[in-house]
Image (tube, grey):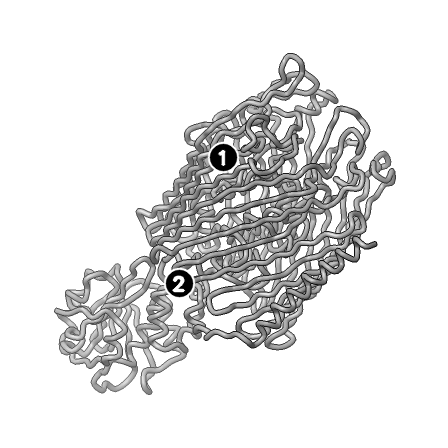
């Protein structure tokens, strides 16, 4: 075995023994933290039990929110995170997070969630115009959120003016 | 005696001046410190953990989320240490710097460091000897020990002449960032950084977080271009960051015809049939925690050449091999909030220009120790100083060799150096002053002072820099010289820049390089070393010029356009480097260069990256006439057009595929010898199509 083959073999061994995970995208991490922070600025009517956040479909934000749920509470309530593909499971939740890939479910969720006091968060441009309460956007890599006071109040929720100052308010 | 007293007094004045500036700053001036968040770079924001983000207020999160966006500030606010021991942004740092990011290297499809440096103003490449391609900068042939190449802080230049061969050498897939000083660096780095510094920072364990394998295959029109394999592995484990990065490569420099002339004898070699092979092996191991760091680099680079040997010796050809082993142990000790002390020890083995069977091969060992002090006087003033000692020993290999200069089998050098540099921030202006002095057992004293002012006023910035620098003669120079002394230079630079908006930035600079005691190769045709051929301190040299650069960066892509120009009209250049009748131009190096590189992402995972170098005409020795005299001809201008397409996360996360074409117009630019060394221009590669596949551990995770 010459030196070149030895080096190649050594490098391959290093590769095979060093498989670990990469860090999750910072975008999803920040969105999850925003979602948690929104709970400090939104008022829900008293509901007994856990504070429930539903994430629709496969999204990295689910694991991020779950990680926060293991460390934080909303008031005294523990945070429960549900990952589902079925809009039927959203009824007792406080927040529904609809990733961009599931935006097609927004209208059916809107119909089901009326009178349910649920904060709907989306990540598709124009979603606040079609009923979303808070919508994440990304422009040139800058993460921000649009917020609709009207939609939030239509779902029977209250919103702090401090939060309205931090987002882009979408008016009807 | 009187003279040495005057030198001593002059040095004392410089020291006193530096201390005066340090203490002036020690409390008399202050500026309000902006918040930590405002100073954070995008890279730092991306590294924040969930726990750190959870501790922040909503206002801070909104601020960070906006700052995370793509803007030119990502580049402008990047902290760099390349031109100063104090961390400063590229607009503040006391040097004319270029920074090439990992993203730019990756998307450009760069085959090697030549492709990367061609994107930078002022850089050009030429042919040296024995199959070696070297670098020119700002109209000066800096290959001869005047530009320092660092990898993770390790000085890679070989230890005989302090040269660095280019071409499928340094693995580009290990690069996290390339920081380049296009001017002097002696005050920080000593005698191998007279006219430039290329500082390569490779990926950390945290960057890699697992492993990645890169396979590259390139095909020129008539022969294989390159077959490379690189593996990067690394992880952040507890407090440690551990990396192992390796590369093995085989390539052909050219597939064109090469014509040599030695003693009126023409010889044509078709390189598509072999004769320009390069073999590379490179291993970089690192481990570090907050205080302690280890580095070990093994580098072996062989370049085949058969022309010179063919004519004179009658051989089939031979490998010219450069082998280096470098090691470092460093400890960063924070004594208190203001003072940190860094002791470090280095070892370097260098066996350059090794040819099997040659009667006079030699290798060099370097043992080095240094102690660096960083003292933060207050929020506006920093004082950095240090002492370094190195011991070089050149040793002949085998029984036949000896050094010409002392007729023994070894040459040793003791070198003691000390440096001090102070940085004072007065409101928006930075004052930088410092110097480095060296005492060398062979050539005596050398001094590199520097004074600079830089200022950033919102959108506008300026720099005015005045630096002394020097080039130390290496063991290879000392071997064939009588009383060789360091080459000295004085460089003046002025830069101005303007941030047009969030996404665009423009900068312009002018420079004046004045070299004295130029270390120059001479050959009068005789056979006696140091008398008929060798190195001497010749006439003055240098250049004057300007460089312009425009940069734009958006989420969908980025673009950089630059222009560089030099003239030697105001400098008396050694005859060997000059072009008779064209006093503006240096031999082998183009006076004008336009560079463009960009990237457009039509899809989230698809990057299309064109690049272009327009190289103005050059002059070089092209052939010998009937009387045996070397004849200078004009070459070019030519345009190198390249395009690279990269698709990331193909099929699943962790698989990336690039398809690139280099020299689409098939101009085959030659490498011209930038001095009268007796060689025709060495042909470059023809159009090369390159396929690169990168597979990371994420791919396996998803299986």
B545, above or below B454, in the image: above
Q: Nearer the viewer, mark 2 or mark 1?
A: 2
Residue B471 appears in the picture as rendered: yes
Furthest residue to the front? B2
- Decide which of A20, B436 is in the foreground and name it: B436
Q: Where is residue A31 in the image (x, y as percent from the top left)?
A: 33, 68
In the image, taking residue B695 as reference, residue A81 lies left or right, namely: left
Quarter of the image for residue B621 reads: top right
* Residue contact at pointers 2 and 1, CB within 8 angstroms: no
State how far apart marks 2 and 1 are (Cα). 45 Å
Q: Mark 2 lies on which chain?
A: B
Identify residue for label 1.
B218
Give the mark nearer the N terminus: 2 vs 1.
1
- Decide which of B154, B180 is in the foreground and name it: B180
- At a point 67% along the width and 46% down the height, the residue shown is B488
Q: Where is residue B498 in the image (x, y as percent from the top left)?
A: 39, 55
- Asked which secondary structure carries label 1, the reply is strand
Mark number, residue A168: none
Within 10 Å of disc 1 (Cα), the crowding (few <14, some 14-19, many 20+) is many
Within 10 Å of disc 2 (Cα), the crowding (few <14, some 14-19, many 20+) is few
A2, above or below B12, in the image: above
Quarter of the image for residue B580 reads: top right
Mark number, residue B458: 2
Q: Mark 1 lies on which chain?
A: B
Quarter of the image for residue B8 reads: bottom right
In the image, taking residue B643 as reference, residue B248 lies left or right, namely: right
Quadrant, the C terminus of chain B: bottom left
- Asked which secondary structure carries label 2, the reply is loop
């Amino acid at each position: 075995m010459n030196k070149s083959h030895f080096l190649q073999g050594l490098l391959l061994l290093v590769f095979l023994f060093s498989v670990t995970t990469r860090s999750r995208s910072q975008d999803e991490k920040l969105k999850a933290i925003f979602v948690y922070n929104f709970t400090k600025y939104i008022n829900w009517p008293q509901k007994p039990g856990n504070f429930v956040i539903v994430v629709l479909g496969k999204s990295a934000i689910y694991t991020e929110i779950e990680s926060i749920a293991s460390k934080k509470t909303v008031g005294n309530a523990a945070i429960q995170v549900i990952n589902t593909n079925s809009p039927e499971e959203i009824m007792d939740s406080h927040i529904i997070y609809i990733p961009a890939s599931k935006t097609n479910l927004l209208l059916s969720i809107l119909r089901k969630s009326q009178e349910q006091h649920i904060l709907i968060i989306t990540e598709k441009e124009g979603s606040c115009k079609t009923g979303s309460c808070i919508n994440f956007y990304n422009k040139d890599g800058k993460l921000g959120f649009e917020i609709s006071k009207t939609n939030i109040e239509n779902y029977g929720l209250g919103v702090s003016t401090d939060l309205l100052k931090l987002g882009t308010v979408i008016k009807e | 005696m009187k003279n040495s007293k005057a030198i001593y007094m002059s040095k004392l004045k410089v020291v006193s001046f530096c201390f005066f500036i340090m203490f002036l700053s020690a409390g008399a001036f202050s500026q309000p410190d902006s918040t930590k968040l405002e100073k954070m770079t995008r890279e730092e924001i991306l590294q924040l953990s969930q726990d750190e983000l959870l501790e922040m207020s909503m206002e801070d999160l909104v601020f960070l989320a906006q700052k995370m966006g793509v803007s030119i500030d990502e580049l402008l606010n990047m902290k760099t240490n390349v031109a100063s021991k104090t961390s400063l942004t590229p607009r503040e740092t006391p040097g004319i710097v270029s920074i090439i990011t990992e993203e730019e290297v990756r998307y450009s499809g760069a085959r090697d460091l030549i492709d990367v440096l061609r994107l930078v103003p002022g850089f050009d490449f030429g042919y040296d000897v024995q199959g070696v391609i070297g670098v020119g900068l700002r109209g000066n042939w800096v290959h001869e020990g005047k530009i320092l190449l660092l990898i993770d802080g390790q000085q890679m230049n070989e230890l005989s002449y302090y040269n660095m061969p280019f071409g499928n050498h340094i693995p580009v897939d290990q690069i996290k960032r390339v920081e380049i000083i296009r001017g002097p660096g002696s005050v920080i780095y000593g005698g191998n950084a007279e006219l430039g510094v290329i500082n390569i920072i490779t990926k950390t364990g945290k960057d890699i977080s697992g492993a990645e394998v890169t396979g590259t295959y390139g095909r020129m029109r008539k022969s294989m271009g390159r077959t490379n394999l690189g593996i990067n592995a690394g992880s952040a484990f507890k407090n440690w960051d551990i990396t192992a990065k390796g590369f093995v490569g085989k390539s052909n420099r050219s597939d064109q015809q090469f014509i040599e002339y030695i003693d009126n004898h023409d010889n044509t070699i078709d390189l598509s049939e072999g004769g320009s092979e390069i073999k590379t092996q490179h291993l970089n191991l690192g481990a570090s925690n907050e205080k302690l760091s280890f580095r070990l680099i093994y580098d072996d680079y062989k370049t085949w050449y058969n022309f010179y040997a063919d004519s004179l010796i009658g051989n089939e050809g031979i490998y010219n091999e450069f082998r280096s082993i470098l090691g470092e142990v460093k400890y960063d000790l924070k004594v208190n909030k203001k003072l940190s002390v860094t002791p470090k020890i280095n070892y370097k083995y260098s066996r350059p220009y090794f040819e099997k069977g040659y009667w006079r091969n030699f290798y060099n060992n370097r043992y080095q120790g240094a102690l660096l002090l960083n003292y933060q006087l207050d929020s506006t003033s920093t004082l950095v100083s240090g002492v370094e000692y190195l011991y070089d020993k050149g040793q002949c290999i085998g029984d036949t060799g000896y050094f010409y200069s002392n007729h023994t089998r070894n040459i040793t050098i003791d070198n003691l150096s000390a440096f001090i540099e102070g940085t004072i921030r007065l409101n928006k202006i930075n004052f930088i002053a410092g110097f480095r002095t060296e005492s060398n057992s062979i050539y005596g004293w050398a001094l590199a002072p520097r004074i600079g002012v830089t200022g950033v006023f919102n959108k506008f910035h300026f720099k005015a820099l005045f630096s002394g620098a020097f080039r130390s003669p290496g063991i290879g120079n000392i071997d064939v010289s009588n009383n060789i002394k360091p080459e000295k230079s004085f460089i003046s630079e002025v830069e101005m820049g303007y941030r047009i908006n969030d996404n665009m930035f423009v900068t312009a600079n002018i420079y004046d390089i004045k070299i004295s005691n130029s270390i120059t190769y001479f050959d009068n045709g005789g056979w006696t070393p140091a008398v008929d051929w060798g190195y001497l301190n010749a006439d003055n040299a240098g250049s004057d010029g300007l460089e312009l650069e425009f940069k734009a960066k958006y989420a969908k892509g980025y673009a950089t356009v630059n222009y560089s120009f030099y003239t030697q009209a105001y400098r008396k250049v050694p005859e060997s480097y000059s072009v008779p009748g064209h006093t503006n131009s240096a031999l082998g190096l183009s006076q004008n260069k336009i560079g463009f590189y960009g990237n457009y992402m039509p899809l989230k995972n698809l990057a299309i990256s064109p690049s272009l170098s327009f190289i103005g005409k050059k002059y070089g020795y092209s052939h010998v006439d009937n009387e045996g005299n070397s004849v200078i001809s004009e070459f070019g201008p030519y345009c190198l057009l390249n395009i690279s397409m990269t698709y990331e996360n193909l099929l699943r996360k962790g698989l990336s595929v690039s398809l690139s074409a280099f020299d689409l117009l098939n101009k085959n630019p030659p490498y011209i010898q930038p001095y009268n060394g007796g060689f025709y221009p060495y042909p470059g590669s023809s159009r090369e199509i390159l396929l690169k596949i990168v597979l990371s551990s994420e791919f396996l995770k998803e299986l």
